[in-house]
Each structure stands twice: as structure tokens, then as C-alpha cells.
Amino acid sequence: KAGVTQTPRYLIKTRGQQVTLSCSPISGHRSVSWYQQTPGQGLQFLFEYFSETQRNKGNFPGRFSGRQFSNSRSEMNVSTLELGDSALYLCASSKQGDLFSPLHFGNGTRLTVT
Amino acid sequence: AQSVTQPDIHITVSEGASLELRCNYSYGATPYLFWYVQSPGQGLQLLLKYFSGDTLVQGIKGFEAEFKRSQSSFNLRKPSVHWSDAAEYFCAVGKNYGGSQGNLIFGKGTKLSVKP
């Protein structure tokens, strides 16, 4: 069974641009969550989607958005990039999206903003 | 507000020695607690979780953790460390109502180095 796949693996963007990251969950998983990981702030929850609906959202500005498609694949978008958006963005999927469904993480997309 | 504190940023142990990584949480109700491990260039892997019941939980790779409500702690232990255990370890807490594992609060992590 394929794991959580995140593309691209690495990305370099310029300040002010926008970026879209993609996440393909494990087959059969309906919940997808996104986390931002930086050395200073650690792992911070961005948002969670379940069956195409955003169920939870973290404390990030509106420049950060996401969506989930009917096949459970998810994308997150960051507009008007800032230097501080440089981070590892992790996607995780789970079967039922509840506390009893283990989270499976992808290897992340490393975003560098210059 | 919920929070997780991992007091040790970096720990070095000798191969074969025992290990204890500390985790303290702040949460008003019964917490749902997790330990994850992240190897360089990889995502996170669940080591173990505590929801209720026996306060000593066993996980993968020979790890265990003990929930102590009186101390608001959930420390991770391993009796004998292997070089392959070198990684970063994260403690996390999840809401226990209407919550999901997709909305976890993580500690800042403890980086484990293993000396040969």
C-alpha cells in the first residue's frame, strides 16, 4: 500500500509569489491534515479536511488556504509568500479522521522563500 | 490553552544505555497523548499513544511511555538504545472531544543523538 505522497519534494519561490502544494493520502483515507514545521515554532497545525470539508483550522493568516477533492487528495496554497513561510510542510492522512485513527505522515515539501 | 513542553532540546546517549525523554502537557480534561519520531528527511511516525486505561503503554521499536496525571507527564522510555534510534522525538496532545488526530498540538521536539 502506497504511503502519503507529497509533491513537489522541494520548492524555491520568491517573496510575493504564490505556491500550491499537493498531497495524496493513503488509499481509503478520508482525512487529510497539514502542518508547518520550522526550527523556531516547531510543528504547527494548519488545517484538516474530511470528506472535502474543512473541519479544523489553525492560527494562520488567510494567505494559507487549502482544499480537498472528492478522491481525498488535498492541496494547500500560500499566496503572497513571505520569507517566514520557509518551512517543511507536512501532510498527514487518516482513515476516519478521529482520535482513534492513526495519522500517517508524508515526507513533506520543503519550501524556501527568497 | 493546551500546550506541550519537551524540556530537553537535545540529548546524547551511548548505544546500549537507557533513555528517557520528558514530556509535560497542559490540558484541562483527560488528555489524549502521543509520541512521534522523525528521522532526517522523513515525515513523522507514530511510536505510541495513550487514550485511557493502563498508564504504561507499549509502542513500536521497543519504546514505552508512562502517563502520570499527577505530574502532567508522559515520558518516553527505552531500556537499551540502538544507533538507529537517533532521530527527533515529538510529544503531542489531542483534544478528547470532537477532536481528531489531525489536530494535534506538538511539543518542540527532542533531538536524540546516539554515541557508539
Image (cartoon, rainbow, N blue to C red):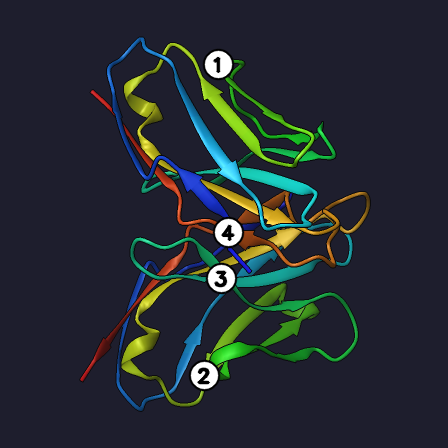
Q: Residue at x 45, y 83 (%)?
A: B78
Chain containing the residue with disc 3: B
How packed is label 2: few (under 14 Cα within 10 Å), some, or many (20 or more)?
Answer: some
Q: Is residue A42 visible?
A: no
| Label 2 sits on residue | B78
Q: CA distance from mark 4 to mark 1?
A: 23 Å
Which quadrant of the figure has residue B54? Answer: bottom right
Q: Quadrant of the N terminus of chain B?
A: top right
Chain containing the residue with disc 4: A
Q: Is residue B79 above or below residue B22?
A: below
Which amino acid type is shown beneath numbered disc 3?
Gln
Q: Quadrant of the C terminus of chain B?
A: bottom left
| Label 1 sits on residue | A63
Which amino acid type is shown beneath numbered disc 4?
Phe
| Label 3 sits on residue | B45
Element class at badge 3: strand
Where residue A2 sits: x, y (%)?
51, 56
Same chain for the residues at labels 2 and 4, yes or no? Answer: no
Where residue B70 sits: x, y (%)?
68, 69
Q: CA distance from mark 1 to mark 2?
A: 42 Å
How packed is label 4: few (under 14 Cα within 10 Å), some, or many (20 or more)?
Answer: many
Chain containing the residue with disc 2: B
Q: Is residue A60 above or below residue A87?
A: above
